Image: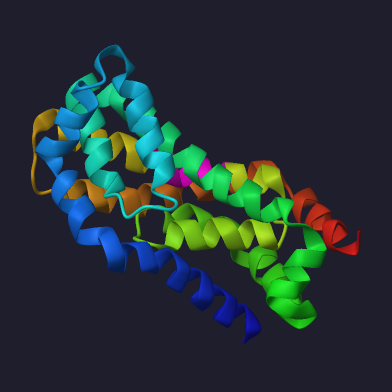
């Protein structure tokens, strides 16, 4: 149960900026506002879009709207590549920062028992959690942080992260290019395709990652 409380605490920490500034950011970064904001940076709009997606870690930015704006500015292909890259960078940063805390800090946060629970959870279902969480609000950051704290193997984490980010980025960029204001198909693809991708990728990783995961906790 300790791992549940760690999830809850992380979720609350992520939620606080949404409660304080969420409405303001949503008004500023609606579809038209996001497109205007990107275009204000001219040839550096791509970099501005990436920064916005990475800042979604700490600010209540509507990441899917930013992805759609990238699709509108750059088209479905290049916009999708940028959107997927930005989401991937955000997840990688959350994972890396939490993993850098080290085992001692992780034990202080979760306790030895809680850390073992997290180890078992992410050894058993970490890839699924990472891949399927990307389209949800709040959970992507929480899951990526938990993956870092429990020292989920990097290769497995990044593979699962890519499985989640790629379909979401390209789906919402396509929405932006076509001007569709009802992205139900994009949401559906963001849910279904990560599962399909992970089913295909997971066997290629083999079982060695889980062993490496356990070894990391013995050190």
89 in the magenta segment: no
List the single residue furthest toward the top. 43
Taking the spot 58% from the left edge, 42% from the top edge, the residue there is: 159
- Looking at the magenta stretch, what is its main secondary structure? helix
Using the rendered image of the protein, determine whether residue 155 is visible from the camera's viewpoint: yes
107, above or below 45, in the image: below
Taking the spot 66% from the left edge, 41% from the top edge, the residue there is: 204
Q: Quadrant of residue 121?
A: bottom right
165 in the magenta segment: yes
Question: Residue 6, position in %: x, y?
Answer: 58, 76
Question: Residue 35, position in %: x, y?
Answer: 16, 31
- Relative horizontal placement of residue 199, taking residue 35 as reference (left or right): right
Q: Nearer the viewer, residue 17 or 218?
A: 17
179, above or below 29, in the image: above
Q: Nearer the viewer, residue 97 or 144?
A: 97
Using the rendered image of the protein, determine whether residue 201 is visible from the camera's viewpoint: no
Question: Residue 181, position in %: x, y?
Answer: 8, 44
Magenta residues, start to end: 159-166
Taking the spot 75% from the left edge, 79% from the top edge, the residue there is: 111
């Amino acid at each position: 149960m300790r791992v549940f409380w760690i999830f809850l605490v992380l979720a609350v920490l992520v939620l606080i900026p949404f409660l304080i500034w969420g409405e303001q950011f949503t008004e500023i970064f609606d579809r038209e506002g996001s497109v205007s904001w990107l275009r204000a940076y001219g040839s550096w709009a791509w970099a501005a879009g990436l920064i916005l997606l990475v800042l979604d870690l700490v600010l209540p930015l509507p990441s899917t709207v930013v992805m759609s704006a990238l699709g509108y500015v750059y088209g479905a292909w290049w916009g999708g590549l940028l959107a997927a890259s930005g989401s991937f960078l955000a997840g990688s940063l959350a994972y890396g920062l939490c993993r850098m805390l080290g085992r001692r800090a992780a034990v202080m946060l979760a306790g030895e028992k809680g850390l073992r629970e997290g180890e078992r959870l992410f050894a058993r279902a970490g890839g699924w959690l990472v891949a399927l969480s990307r389209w949800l609000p709040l959970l992507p950051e929480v899951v990526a942080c938990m993956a870092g704290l429990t020292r989920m193997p990097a290769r497995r984490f990044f593979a699962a992260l890519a499985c989640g980010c790629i379909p979401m980025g390209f789906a919402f960029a396509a929405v932006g290019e076509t001007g569709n204001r009802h992205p139900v198909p994009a949401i559906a693809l963001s849910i279904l395709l990560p599962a399909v991708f992970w089913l295909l990728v997971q066997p290629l990783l083999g079982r060695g990652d889980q062993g490496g995961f356990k070894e990391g906790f013995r050190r």
